[in-house]
Image (spheres, coloured by chain):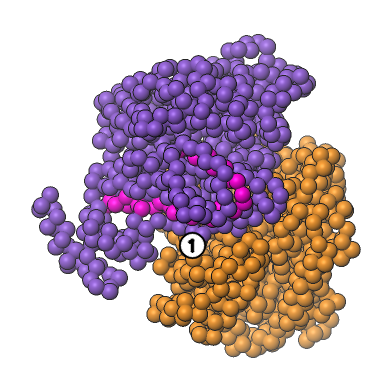
């Protein structure tokens, strides 16, 4: 292929410490790049990274830019605005009598015995929660109309308080949105500069707290996302970017900046959302439809599930104890990462995290003033990391200092030496992470032993083996792009939009006409939005689902169905599928008892298929070495199976060819990732520079594609 | 067990594993039970015990269950001796053999490793019905246990893995609702899960290592607890609180009197001078009263202390039979769990002088309505406990305001409100207001948590309302100069204009559609003199309309100039200075 015809797609994942870039050419070439994040304005690091890549490629910026046809961007701007309470000054307009739902959060205190545990500050303070004497009843009938005079008073208040954003959420608007429409229209006319959103535009479904909370989040971060995207688009324009910019959404899809600016709440978990997408891709390369992904970063450990090549989504999400009920990839995040600090509780037990040393001051070994031993210090003391080859030697680590501090802070009180204390830290944090994986699998009714684990993050592969041993997971994969996993996954995102309507009735009372009408409505809305985003009708796929439960139950079960089943109104088939799903999730069904079902919500996901890169491998022609050729040195490292330090071979993973077998215990070092093989494991390299690690005892025949899944129980 | 070296890391791993097993059991129960009091209100507990019935760990979703399983486990071990086999399932609710409340039915499964009894998994949940004279079990007319419930002393419903169908049928022939059978099956399921996980864990590390490390865990937890107790000055501390109205004799009053003896690392909770038992259902059981004592003390110590046997070992409970806190056979006791707020008050008041920085001012007491009736649009019966209405504020403490709308201390924020829109679908009622009540938080340097006003228009004909609770006579107390809060109350206004103020234990029948129900759940008491509250905190409360300017002036001595939302700091300082000199 001529160089001039070469086109690129670029995934950009802005994280807390690093901004990750993954560039893929239409000829299959690829490039990994990392640059320091710029938290005060993350678009700065974003643009700087593009400059740096152009330099790496020896191209002038202008000719590099014109070759990029798509940039997909995951951002933590919304997340950070939420976590640091730096969103817009927001007001809420709601029904008289319901002013405090947002703040009450249904009256929960998460820590039962801790009287110093405070409620979270509401995103909208009480004095900006303004009430209207309107009411729609539980059948959708208007009991009292919206009063213009009250609206005028509200407008005056919003002006005098210099509010920047307004959320509108009225009782029972999921049945009748006329009042919300009136209020939104009135406020938009009266206050043209403000970010205004009504709950029916964000989440038109039953459950007032969920809706008011989600709508307020949308308004609160709407202005922030709007400003950020404007500044980013402006900077891209200045460097003459003419391609398409897409933003990663919490549901694992992408969205154009124009749509993201309206429904900003879809970007709340934009960052980690690409991991299961990438996981699904790599699992399929190996012939697996199911996998668990884990991504171990500096402060947090994210894990998620892929079943039947689909990422699991849920509407039960929370951010910082505030409900967000939009469909969000079911990602469990726990406070465990390279920066997690080891400490001793009052009873003398060793604990890890959730406090993190972050990147500043960082772990002790960074020698930037950190005085508390962190996970990375333990990994260093245990010999997994080479103090002179961290990030390929870019940073020098101070092993002696790490050992000294670990010994004095943790070893002494525990009666252990530095190495023993570090081994304890290693085992405890592995246990914590295994618990996260258990939460995302076992607690969702899935057996982790039937899954392939895909391991990402620079330090993830040091810990994955022990996490797998704890959960009896027989095998894990370390993709070549492990260190920038999410940036790679972003390039695989399709445009995805979720629609919901509440339709509450007994299953046997479902009215065909009304039911199909609701789907037609959602389908039209989807087609309009996707066509605005430049997707042809032929490239749209629909995935309907229903929220169902047995009559009398409180928790509904989301059930995925097919568009044919919906359009042909095949309710018997759907009922049958519900019994099965209920059984799979909860271990029993009420098929024979003849228990009636209830429908709560009907949902539709519309997917606009985007063009995908030809390959996601980190291509590199230098990778031809045998194990012998890649052998670097012998190093003392901790082997958890034997609970002792042993002398292990260290290999250069960046030069290993395809199909090479490395027997554990061993260490495989790469610039951006380190892989530790305990004595339970063997490892094989596969196409594209990825590693397959399998348990010798659980898989005595060695690694074979698809060899661990018993396909039952997965449908 | 000699010769086993304690591995400090393995200790952490065991503790983490015990916790995650009981958590997993708890999640399984939430998702599989059907009665709202289990799957929504989470009125259940899951736990693991060793072969002697010592608690390894438990997950109590509502603190009132913090002491409820261990004593029963010991009764079962005693009763069956060596006749315990793998595959057995034992059921129990009997309040005269260490049960806490008739409706709280426990399931126990023994756990064997290498043929040896190593422990127990257990789950106890509040059942929607347990037989007796009244559906649901709250029978204010009861004087004996048989009018309240079916007694189930420990009995095997499975032996060696085989269902004893005759026993099963006998039990459920005496319970009105089929849903209870389903919920009991869910509890058995959760216990099987716990059994499997603990078996795997013990097999993995070996019986000897498990035993040695378990003991070490108990010892360390006990040491943590003892260190907490040692930080309390030695002495005998006295406190008292009152229970009003036994459901039969209007105006009746009872006293809950605590003598708390702190002696170095030991603490004794002596309630023997409390009132004698009542002739109604307002009586505690030994286990429910000890739960209340335990949970109150847990609120004053490091919340990170693990919940195992070591936690309760340094605590001595003196709750003699025949008192209102431990009724003798065969007295009625269903109200017993709801004596928790008064027990907590009595303890907080006693320990206030000794632990001023750890006690809280008075929490709002429970006052609760249960509606039953027909949903005309659906043509179906419904039962609804009005959780949203019953939740007032908690008491303030040193350094923090009380928590708004948290509900009684027995639950400490574990009970969820119904969702308003779901509520209007599931009942014929329409919510008119559910908001914080202005000026309901007891004034103090730290303000009591806010109470809540609930107004509901009742729909459907012929609604029955059962009321149970307290807190409508004496206001929650403030501490160290802090003030009390407003009283609980429930009042209904009939369509014909008549009104009725409910008693704290009451049954009101035949309520017509259009009746307006108004409930106030009071706030928590304040802590410290109100005039020492940071004027900026008062400003914020006034801005947010949870404290009126009148109250700001009267209680907090904060002056707002006409039309301004900011306090006049000069005048405030003057007023406060004057107050100090006068006082």
Disc 1 element: loop
| B361 to the left or right of B109 | left
* Segment colored magenta: B440-469
In the picture shown, does residue B475 fall above or below A118?
above
Q: Is residue B285 at least partly visible in the picture?
A: yes
Could you say which is closer to the camera, residue B154 or residue A685? B154
Could you say which is closer to the camera, residue A618 or residue A22? A22
Please identify the quarter of the rendering in which residue B79 is found: top right
Please, which residue is most extreme toward the top here? B82
Q: Which percent across, then down, holds residue A704? A: 86, 48
Q: Residue at x 50, y 54 (%)?
A: B496
In the picture shown, does residue B120 fall above or below A1?
above
Please identify the quarter of the rendering in which residue A56 is found: bottom right
Tint applied to chain A in the drawing? orange
Question: Quick one: which chain is purple?
Answer: B
Q: Which percent across, then down, holds residue A8? A: 74, 78
The residue tagged 1 is: A97
């Amino acid at each position: 292929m001529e160089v001039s015809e070469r086109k690129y797609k670029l995934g950009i994942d802005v994280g807390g410490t690093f901004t990750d870039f993954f560039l893929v050419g239409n000829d299959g070439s690829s490039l990994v790049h990392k640059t320091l994040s710029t938290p005060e304005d993350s678009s700065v690091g974003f643009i700087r990274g593009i400059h740096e890549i152009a330099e790496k490629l020896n191209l002038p910026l202008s000719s590099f830019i014109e070759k990029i046809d798509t940039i997909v961007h995951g951002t933590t701007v919304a997340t950070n605005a939420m976590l640091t309470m730096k969103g817009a000054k927001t007001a809420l307009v709601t029904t008289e009598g319901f002013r405090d739902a947002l703040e009450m959060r249904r009256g929960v205190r998460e820590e039962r015995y801790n009287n110093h545990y405070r409620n979270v500050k509401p995103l909208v303070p009480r004095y900006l929660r303004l009430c209207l004497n309107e009411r729609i009843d539980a059948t959708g009938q208007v009991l009292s109309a919206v009063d213009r005079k009250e609206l005028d008073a509200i407008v005056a208040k919003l002006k005098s308080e210099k509010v920047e954003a307004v959320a509108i959420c009225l009782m029972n608007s999921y049945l009748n949105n006329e009042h919300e429409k009136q209020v939104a229209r009135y406020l938009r006319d009266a206050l043209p500069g403000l970010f205004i959103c009504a709950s029916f535009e964000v989440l038109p479904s039953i459950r007032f707290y969920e809706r008011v909370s989600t709508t307020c989040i949308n308004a609160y971060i709407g202005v922030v996302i709007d400003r950020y995207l404007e500044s980013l688009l402006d900077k891209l324009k200045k460097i003459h970017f003419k391609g398409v910019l897409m933003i990663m959404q919490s549901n694992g899809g992408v969205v154009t900046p124009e749509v993201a600016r309206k429904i900003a709440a879809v970007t709340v978990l934009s960052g980690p959302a690409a991991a299961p997408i990438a996981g699904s891709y790599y699992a399929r390369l190996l012939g697996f439809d199911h996998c668990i992904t884990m991504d171990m970063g500096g402060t947090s450990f994210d894990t998620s599930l892929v079943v039947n090549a689909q990422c699991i989504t849920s509407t039960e999400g929370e951010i910082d104890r505030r409900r967000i009920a939009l469909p969000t990839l079911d990602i469990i995040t726990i406070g465990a990462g390279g920066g997690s600090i080891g400490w001793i509780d009052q009873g003398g037990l060793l604990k890890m995290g959730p406090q993190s040393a972050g990147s500043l001051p960082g772990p002790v070994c960074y020698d930037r003033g950190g005085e508390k031993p962190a996970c990375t210090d333990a990994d260093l003391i245990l010999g997994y990391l080479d103090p002179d080859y961290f990030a390929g030697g870019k940073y020098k680590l101070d092993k002696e200092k790490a050992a000294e501090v670990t010994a004095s802070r943790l070893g002494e009180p525990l009666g252990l030496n530095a190495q023993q204390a570090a081994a304890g830290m290693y085992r405890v944090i592995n246990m914590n992470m295994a618990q996260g994986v258990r939460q995302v699998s076992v607690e969702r009714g899935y057996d982790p032993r039937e899954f392939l684990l895909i391991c990402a993050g620079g330090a993830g592969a040091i810990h994955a083996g022990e996490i797998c041993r704890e959960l009896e997971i027989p095998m894990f994969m370390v993709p070549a792009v492990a260190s920038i996993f999410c940036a790679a996954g972003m390039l695989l995102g399709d445009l995805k939009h979720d629609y919901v309507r509440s339709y509450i009735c007994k299953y046997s009372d479902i009215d065909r006409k009304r039911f199909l009408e609701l789907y037609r409505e959602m389908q039209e809305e989807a087609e309009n939005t996707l066509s605005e985003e430049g997707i042809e009708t032929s490239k749209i796929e629909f995935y309907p689902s229903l929220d169902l439960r047995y009559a009398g139950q409180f928790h509904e079960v989301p059930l995925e169905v097919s568009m044919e089943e919906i359009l042909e109104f095949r309710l018997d088939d759907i009922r049958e599928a519900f019994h099965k799903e209920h059984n799979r999730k909860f271990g029993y069904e009420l098929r024979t008892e003849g228990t009636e079902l209830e429908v709560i919500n009907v949902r539709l996901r519309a997917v606009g298929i985007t063009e995908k890169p030809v390959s996601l491998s980190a291509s590199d022609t230098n990778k031809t070495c045998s194990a012998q050729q890649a052998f670097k040195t012998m190093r003392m490292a901790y082997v958890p199976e034997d609970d002792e330090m042993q002398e292990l071979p260290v290999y250069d993973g960046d030069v290993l060819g395809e199909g090479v077998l490395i027997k554990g215990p061993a260490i495989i070092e790469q610039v951006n990732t380190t892989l530790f093989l305990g004595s339970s494991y063997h490892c094989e390299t596969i196409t594209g520079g990825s590693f397959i690690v399998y348990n010798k005892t659980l898989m005595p025949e060695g690694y074979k594609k698809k060899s661990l899944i018993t396909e039952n129980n997965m449908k | 067990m000699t010769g086993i070296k304690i591995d400090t890391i393995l200790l952490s791993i065991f503790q983490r594993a015990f916790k995650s097993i009981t958590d997993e059991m708890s999640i399984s129960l939430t998702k599989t039970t059907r009665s709202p009091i289990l799957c929504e209100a989470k009125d259940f507990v899951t736990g693991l015990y060793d072969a002697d019935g010592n608690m390894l760990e438990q997950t109590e979703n509502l603190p009132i269950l913090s002491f409820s399983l261990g004593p029963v486990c010991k009764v079962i071990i005693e009763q069956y001796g060596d006749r315990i086999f793998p595959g057995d399932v034992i059921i129990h609710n009997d309040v005269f053999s260490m049960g806490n409340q008739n409706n709280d039915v426990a399931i126990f499964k023994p756990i064997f490793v290498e043929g040896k009894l190593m422990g127990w998994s257990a789950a106890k949940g509040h059942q929607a019905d347990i037989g007796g004279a009244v559906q649901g079990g709250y029978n204010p007319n009861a004087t004996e246990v048989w009018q309240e419930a079916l007694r189930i002393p420990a009995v095997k419903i499975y032996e060696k893995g085989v269902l004893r169908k005759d026993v099963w049928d006998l039990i459920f022939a005496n319970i009105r609702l089929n849903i209870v059978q389903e919920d009991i099956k869910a509890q058995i399921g959760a216990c099987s899960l716990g059994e499997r996980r603990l078996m795997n864990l013990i097999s993995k590390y070996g019986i000897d290592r498990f035993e040695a490390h378990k003991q070490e865990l108990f010892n360390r937890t006990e040491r943590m607890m003892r260190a907490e107790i040692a930080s309390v000055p030695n002495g005998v501390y006295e406190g008292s609180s009152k229970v009003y109205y036994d459901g039969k004799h209007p105006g009746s009053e009872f006293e809950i009197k605590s003598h708390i003896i702190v002696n170095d690392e030991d603490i004794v909770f002596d309630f023997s001078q409390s009132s004698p038992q009542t002739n109604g259902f307002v009586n505690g059981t030994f286990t429910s009263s000890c739960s209340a004592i335990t949970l109150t003390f847990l609120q004053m110590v490091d919340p990170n202390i693990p919940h195992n046997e070591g936690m309760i070992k340094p605590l001595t409970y003196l709750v003699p039979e025949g008192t209102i806190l431990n009724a003798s056979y065969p007295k009625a006791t269903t109200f017993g769990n709801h004596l928790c707020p008064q027990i907590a008050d009595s303890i907080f008041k006693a320990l206030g002088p000794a632990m001023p920085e750890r006690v809280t001012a008075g929490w709002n007491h429970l006052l609760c309505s249960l509606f039953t009736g027909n949903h005309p649009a659906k043509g179906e019966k419904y039962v609804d406990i009005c959780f949203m209405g019953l939740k007032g504020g908690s008491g303030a403490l040193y350094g923090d305001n009380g928590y708004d709308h948290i509900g009684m201390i027995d639950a400490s924020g574990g009970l969820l409100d119904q969702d308003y829109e779901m509520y209007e679908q599931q009942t014929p009622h329409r919510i008119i207001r559910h908001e914080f009540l202005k000026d309901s938080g007891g004034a103090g340097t730290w303000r009591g948590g806010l109470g809540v006003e609930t107004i509901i228009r009742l729909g459907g004909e012929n609604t029955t309302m059962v009321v149970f609770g307290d807190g409508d006579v004496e206001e929650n107390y403030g501490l160290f100069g802090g003030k009390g809060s407003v009283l609980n109350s429930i009042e209904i206004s009939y369509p014909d204009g008549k009104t009725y103020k409910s008693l704290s234990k009451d049954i009101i029948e035949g309520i017509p559609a259009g009746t307006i129900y108004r409930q106030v759940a009071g706030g928590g008491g304040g802590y410290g003199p109100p005039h020492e509250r940071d004027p900026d905190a008062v400003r914020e409360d006034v801005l947010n309309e949870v404290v009126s300017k009148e109250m700001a002036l009267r209680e907090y001595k904060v002056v707002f100039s006409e039309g301004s939302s900011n306090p006049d700091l000069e005048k405030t300082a003057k007023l406060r200075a004057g107050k100090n000199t006068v006082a």
